Image (tube, coloured by chain):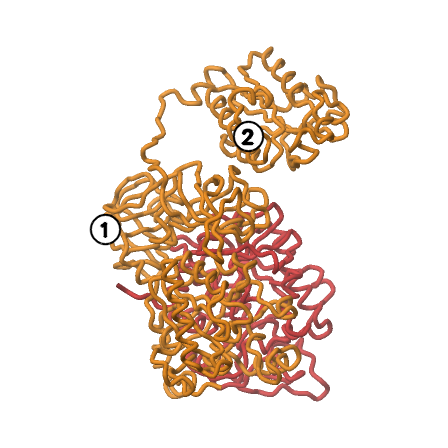
């Protein structure tokens, strides 16, 4: 008798989900955001299909505003996994120069929500893996592992299929698509624990280091390139910071920290008193229902 | 508030994170379900568990405090229920309508809680949550005692194979922590639970609101209580995965891993037992045996693997094995059968249609299955068995199930993986039912397929043609029989071997025992489909002229034939035109109420969405329609 640890059971479940998708989906793709959850998801995919490479490409829905360190890891991670990397930038957003400084919520809507829909339609993917976890946010707690999207990519939380045992009904009508969430039952701590146990490479921004920063609306932002508009006479301040989540650098708040190792990061996380998405601007829209509303519109 | 601190982990985290992580690394995982309605304080209890285990952060707490004052039901105190009722609709209506999954951890274990609603109209949600749980916390309001809903929750938990039941008698603070009341509730529950086959349960007096006996026991208010706290109990019960390891090896094959010609591995999640290189295994249903060569993983080959792990096995022999097969202990393989008795939980607004073909998914097997009229439905409140002709949303019943080919299975009570299944509607793709297989009604092994030397290809070759089933569908009076007849005449002149199956004619013989109810119409088409298949096997071009009003049944026939042989021909005639023709005078009778269940009048017709051929009888003559069909199906070779 050998009692499996919770990480072993989570890993087995995620791998099972991925294999079901590959066997039952027609054109699967893995959404790869270069964050720590994506890193774990990619690692699990390599495990699920070894010695074959994962039989689907990676898709990065790019906003052109990610941290530079993310772009660097993106190429390397795909190469090491032996997978094709597809990068999609919403051509309309590109043309109109949509950016987080001037366009606010429109930035997320056009680059991410619209960009994702465009990319899935363009390539004809019918199943997209995403790294969302149920512990992230209240409406995620009720989302299925296999989450269905209408032909226009909308999510209807009242009309979800029951998911029993580990049986997934992957059947869908033409035009419909599926978001599959193999990390549904992982928590933030599980993710960190697994990264440490498996030696998974993550973007160095998760570890504390002295970086140039400015304060904007209560968020501590990193000046990652010269597109960041500084006020007259304003100079970035070097602070020891790290990030708990990674997105577009002008929208992602850093925390001041001295945690330069994974252990120290986990230690800080466990002793901290604010939730992970707190550094993100988008959840706070529309009262408590911000994320639910975005998902109904097609946000991942 | 709780009279004992939650978990003393902060000190360890601060002082020795390495030691803490090592401890966390070796935690096990328990999945449990909480059953109870809003009134029982279920959400409050879960909120309390999250709060006490530090899973609530300051920003969430700040929002919670603000929300509590705005819409909460606890006055100025924190309303934990707001923390767990996720969807906007639920927050507004103050009810839990879906299954939500919550996570927390103690020093010993990580927990996944399925939080499901308690009302009868959400039975399906509770079944969903219970399907993956090892333990159920049944909440009872101490002021109300064992209620109808307590019985329903217990019955469902037991039905879904949950072996550990906790009777949490909540709101003890509101009855002054009275031991006598607690004891009476436990006695009531004990006699009920025994009657439905629950072997044992643990009873704990708690207050989710005040925190009594949640993390430490006994609380100051219940000195008379001698058992563990709720958390202590959850930390120590036996895990379902451990029990599965002591059963024989079963690994449903999900995916065949073939990176190159030299490697062929079989990937799956081990459902029960354990495996190591050198073990003798049998592939079910083929019955072929081989030996495990290696257990391949990304991190290197393993010496052994156990139930609950996802692995890839290689075998010493090149034997046939694909998705849906089960790799099993050679000396103790599971059975295969195509007729079962099963319990069904109906999950769709559209009621069960006995006889209709549904997709049945069990482990990695997907087959077509039909359900007989239920033997009985179970009243989930009284456990009484009621006669039933169908199963409506949230109904639980027992029925016989037939599959179109044998599937490998085990009784649900022995294996959730090989005994639990779902039914899927073939048209809407909705998951319409959850099922629990109990036993095979006859050993399918006793009814073998007899292999014949002359194959269907030989039959067809001799006739110098490709078999086809030309399936005419349309309203009564649309012209199906007339056009089919004209098509057959043309084929006959071209020396094709044909046979025309006509709806009226078949009802004089083969199907004379069938009427026109929905169930009989389904059976009518099933039989005609089987006959058409036999004739196609014999090499014929079969023409059928039946109203065949339901998409699902036409789809069923399409699926029992080789791909491309089923040609759906929609004889598209508007109801008004067909009714005006009224060749047989049937519409007149139906309108007069003398004929019941008449398609188009008081019984639905579902037109094909993408017919292979469509003929419009308003614009085309019979000869034009027949010529058009011939043009589209030729050359038939």
Instruction: Give percent across and percent down for residue A69.
Output: 54, 72
Q: Nearer the viewer, mark 1 or mark 2?
A: 2
Q: Which residue is mark 1?
A: B279
Q: Which residue is mark 2?
A: B525
Q: Nearer the viewer, residue B485 or B17?
A: B485
Q: Could you tell whether B149 is left or right of B428 in the image?
A: left
- Image position of B610 with respect to A71: above or below: above
Residues at badges 1 and 2 in contact (C-beta under 8 Å)?
no
Residue A260 can be seen in this image: no
Instruction: Give percent across and percent down for residue B478.
Output: 70, 25
Residue B283 can be seen in this image: yes
Q: Check disc 1 and report its element: helix, strand or loop.
A: loop
- Image position of B460 with respect to A15: above or below: above
- Image position of B124 with respect to B547: above or below: below
Instruction: Give percent across and percent down for residue B566.
Output: 55, 29
Chain identifier, orange in the render: B
Chain where mark 1 sits: B
Splitting the image into 4 quarters, where does residue B160 fall? bottom left
- The Cα atoms of the two marked residues, 1 and 2, are separated by 48 Å
Splitting the image into 4 quarters, where does residue A230 fall? bottom right
Instruction: Give percent across and percent down for residue B317.
Output: 27, 42
Chain where mark 2 sits: B
Q: Which tint is chain A?
A: red
């Amino acid at each position: 008798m050998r009692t499996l640890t919770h990480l072993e059971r989570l890993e087995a479940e995620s791998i099972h989900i991925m294999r079901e998708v590959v066997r039952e989906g027609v054109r699967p793709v893995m959404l790869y955001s270069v964050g720590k959850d994506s890193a774990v998801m990619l690692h699990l995919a390599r495990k699920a299909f070894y010695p074959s490479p994962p039989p689907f490409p990676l898709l990065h829905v790019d906003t052109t505003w990610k941290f530079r360190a993310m772009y660097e890891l993106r190429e390397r991670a795909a190469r090491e996994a032996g997978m094709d990397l597809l990068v999609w930038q919403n051509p309309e957003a590109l043309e109109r120069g949509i950016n987080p400084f001037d366009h606010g919520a429109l930035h997320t809507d056009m680059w991410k929500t619209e960009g994702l829909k465009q990319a899935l339609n363009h390539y004809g993917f019918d199943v997209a893996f995403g790294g969302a976890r149920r512990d992230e946010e209240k409406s995620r707690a009720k989302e299925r592992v296999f989450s269905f999207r209408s032909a226009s990519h909308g999510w209807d939380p009242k009309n979800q299929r029951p998911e029993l045992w580990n049986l997934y009904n992957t059947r869908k009508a033409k035009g419909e698509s599926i978001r599959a969430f193999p990390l549904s039952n992982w928590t933030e701590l599980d993710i960190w624990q697994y990264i440490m146990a498996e030696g998974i490479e993550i973007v160095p921004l998760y570890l504390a280091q002295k970086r140039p920063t400015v304060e904007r609306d209560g968020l501590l932002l990193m000046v990652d390139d010269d597109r960041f508009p500084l006020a007259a006479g304003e100079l970035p301040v070097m602070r020891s910071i790290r990030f708990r989540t990674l997105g577009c650098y002008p929208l992602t708040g850093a925390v001041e920290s001295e945690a330069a190792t994974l252990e120290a990061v986990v230690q800080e996380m466990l002793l901290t008193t604010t939730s992970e998405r707190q550094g993100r601007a988008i959840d706070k829209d529309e009262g408590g229902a911000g994320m639910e509303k975005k998902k109904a519109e097609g946000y991942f | 508030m709780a009279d004992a601190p939650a978990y003393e982990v902060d000190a360890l985290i601060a002082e020795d994170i390495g030691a803490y992580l090592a401890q966390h690394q070796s935690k096990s995982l328990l999945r449990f379900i909480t059953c109870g309605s809003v009134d029982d304080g279920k959400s409050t209890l879960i909120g309390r568990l999250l709060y006490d285990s530090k899973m609530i952060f300051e920003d969430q707490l700040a929002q919670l405090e603000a929300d509590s004052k705005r819409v909460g039901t606890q006055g100025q105190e924190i309303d934990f229920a707001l923390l767990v009722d996720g969807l906007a609709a639920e927050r507004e209506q103050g009810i839990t309508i879906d299954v939500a999954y919550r996570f927390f951890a103690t020093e010993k274990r990580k927990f996944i809680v399925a939080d499901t609603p308690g009302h009868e109209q959400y039975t399906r949600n509770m079944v969903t949550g219970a399907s993956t749980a090892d333990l159920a916390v049944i909440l009872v309001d101490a002021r109300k005692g064992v209620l109808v809903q307590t019985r329903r929750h217990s019955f469902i938990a037991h039905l879904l194979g949950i072996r550990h039941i906790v009777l949490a008698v909540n709101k003890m603070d509101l009855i002054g922590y009275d031991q006598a009341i607690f004891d009476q509730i436990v006695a009531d529950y004990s006699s009920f639970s025994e009657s439905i086959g629950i072997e044992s349960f643990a009873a704990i007096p708690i207050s989710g609101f005040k925190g009594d006996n949640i993390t430490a026991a006994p609380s100051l208010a219940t000195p008379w209580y001698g058992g563990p706290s709720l958390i202590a109990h959850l930390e120590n019960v036996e895990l379902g995965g451990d029990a599965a390891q002591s059963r024989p090896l079963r690994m449903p094959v999900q995916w065949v891993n073939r990176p190159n010609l030299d490697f062929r591995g079989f990937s799956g999640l081990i459902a029960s037992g354990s495996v190591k290189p050198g073990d003798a295994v049998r592939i079910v249903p083929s019955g072929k045996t081989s030996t495990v060569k290696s257990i391949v993983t990304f991190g290197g080959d393993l010496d052994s693997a156990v139930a609950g792990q996802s692995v890839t096995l290689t075998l010493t022999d090149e034997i046939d094995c694909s998705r849906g097969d089960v790799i099993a202990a050679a000396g103790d393989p599971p059975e295969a059968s195509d007729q079962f008795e099963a319990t069904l939980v109906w999950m769709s607004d559209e009621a069960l249609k006995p006889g209709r073909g549904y997709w049945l998914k069990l482990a990695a097997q997907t087959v077509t299955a039909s359900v007989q009229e239920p033997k009985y439905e179970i009243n989930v409140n009284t456990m009484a068995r009621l006669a039933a002709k169908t199963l409506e949303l949230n109904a639980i019943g027992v029925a016989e199930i037939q599959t179109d080919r044998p599937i490998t299975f085990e009784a649900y009570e022995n294996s959730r993986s090989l005994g639990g299944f779902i039914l899927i509607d073939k048209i809407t793709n909705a998951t319409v039912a959850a099922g629990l297989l109990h036993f095979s009604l006859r050993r399918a092994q006793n009814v073998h397929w007899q292999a014949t030397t002359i194959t269907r290809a030989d039959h067809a070759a001799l006739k110098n043609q490709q078999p086809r089933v030309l399936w005419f569908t349309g309203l009564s009076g649309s012209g199906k029989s007339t056009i089919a007849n004209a098509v057959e005449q043309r084929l006959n002149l071209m020396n094709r071997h044909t046979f025309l199956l006509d709806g009226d004619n078949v009802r004089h013989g083969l199907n004379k025992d069938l009427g026109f109810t929905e169930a009989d119409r389904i059976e009518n088409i099933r039989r005609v489909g089987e006959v058409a298949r036999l004739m196609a096997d014999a090499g014929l071009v079969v023409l059928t002229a039946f109203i065949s009003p339901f998409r699902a049944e036409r789809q069923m026939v399409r699926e029992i034939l080789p791909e491309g042989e089923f040609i759906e021909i929609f004889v598209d005639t508007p109801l008004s035109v067909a009714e005006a023709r009224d060749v047989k005078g049937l519409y007149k009778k139906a309108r007069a109420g003398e004929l019941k269940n008449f398609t188009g009048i008081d019984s639905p017709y579902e037109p094909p969405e993408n017919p292979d051929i469509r003929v419009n009888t308003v614009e085309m003559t019979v000869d034009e329609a027949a010529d058009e069909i011939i043009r589209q199906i030729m050359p038939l070779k």
